[in-house]
């Protein structure tokens, strides 16, 4: 409230709020806010992709064979297919495969992007699980405001590239997830792994002390408590909820 108002530097935010109170006739309070900086806390790898391709190609290249004897002659190889770093990057983003796999596929398919993607799928390389460990620091910050403007959600969802972040599929998914958060009042974390350990310990203490378990053998109590806690954690985790659509 002490900051200069962005639309009138001669006033503070607090003064603007007071003016609005005088005009409207009701008290107004700015209760809370949240600021999201996209990718904050995630390591973003800045690199020259063309240089990376060249470096990886050099490292992967086999040692030059010994010079052939003068009397031996080899057939001349066909013209090499030129593969650009841009094409390698595009195929890599589309399939999630390694850089050298993408380069090899493009060479094998004469530079045809679609054929190269099919080639990688046939080789079993284009799999979603290969992308799981890669850094996702691009994406969007989106919001959902429920009808009547009494409930709102601010959501950050990440992906690997700004190209994907601008796409309709990603944008629509982010909007759906924000609406899902608004619909799930008990949800407090993204996944069960995000639930604090002290919360789990407290829940276990509560469950172990419940009357309906006191007559059970210790090993049975432990198993029943584990099941109850697992159910409780799922209730708190966004990714465990039935999809709203």
Image: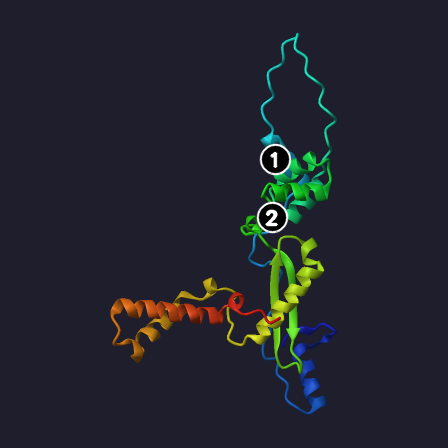
Give me the C-alpha separation between circle 1 and circle 2: 16 Å
Name the residue tied to disc 2.
Answer: 45
Rendered location of residue 94, percent (x, y): 66, 49
| Residue located 70% across and 41% down the image | 115
Rendered location of residue 139, percent (x, y): 64, 59
Q: Earlier in the sequence, mark 1 or mark 2?
A: 2
Vertical position of residue 244 compared to residue 104: above or below? below
Using the rendered image of the protein, determine whether residue 91 is visible from the camera's viewpoint.
yes
Rendered location of residue 195, percent (x, y): 45, 66
| Residue located 73% across and 25% down the image | 78
- Judged from the image, the secondary structure of the residue bearing numbered disc 2 is loop
**Is the N terminus in the top left, top right, bottom left or bottom right quadrant?**
bottom right
Mark linked to residue 56: 1
Left or right of residue 205, residue 20 in this image: right
Please name whichever residue, 39 or 158, is drawn nearer the observer in this view of the structure.
Answer: 158
Vertical position of residue 165 compared to residue 75: above or below? below
| Figure quadrant of residue 10 | bottom right
| Residue located 62% across and 60% down the image | 38
Left or right of residue 160, residue 79 in this image: right
Q: How many residues crowd around disc 1 within 10 Å: few (fewer than 14), some, or many (20 or more)?
A: few
- Judged from the image, the secondary structure of the residue bearing numbered disc 1 is helix
Q: How is the image coloured?
A: rainbow
**Is the C terminus in the top left, top right, bottom left or bottom right quadrant?**
bottom right
């Amino acid at each position: 409230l002490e900051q200069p108002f962005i639309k009138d530097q001669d006033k503070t935010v607090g003064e603007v709020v007071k003016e609005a109170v005088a005009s409207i006739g009701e008290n107004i309070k700015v209760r809370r806010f949240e600021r999201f900086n996209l990718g904050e806390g995630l390591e973003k790898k800045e690199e020259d992709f063309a240089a990376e391709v060249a470096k990886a190609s050099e490292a992967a290249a086999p040692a030059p064979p010994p010079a052939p004897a003068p009397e031996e002659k080899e057939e001349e190889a066909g013209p090499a297919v030129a593969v650009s770093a841009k094409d390698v990057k595009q195929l890599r983003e589309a399939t999630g495969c390694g850089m050298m796999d993408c380069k090899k596929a493009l060479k094998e398919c004469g530079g045809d992007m679609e054929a190269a993607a099919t080639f990688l799928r046939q080789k079993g390389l284009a799999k979603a699980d290969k992308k799981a460990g890669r850094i996702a620091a691009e994406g969007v910050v989106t919001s959902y405001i429920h009808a009547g403007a009494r409930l709102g959600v601010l959501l950050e969802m990440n992906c690997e590239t700004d190209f994907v972040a601008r796409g309709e599929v990603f944008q629509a998914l982010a909007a759906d997830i924000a609406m899902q958060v608004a619909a799930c009042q008990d949800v407090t974390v993204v996944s069960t792994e995000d639930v604090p350990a002290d919360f789990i310990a407290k829940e276990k203490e509560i469950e172990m002390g419940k009357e309906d378990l006191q007559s059970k053998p210790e090993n049975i109590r432990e198993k029943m408590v584990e099941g109850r806690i697992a159910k409780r954690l799922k209730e708190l985790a966004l990714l465990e909820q039935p999809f709203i659509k």
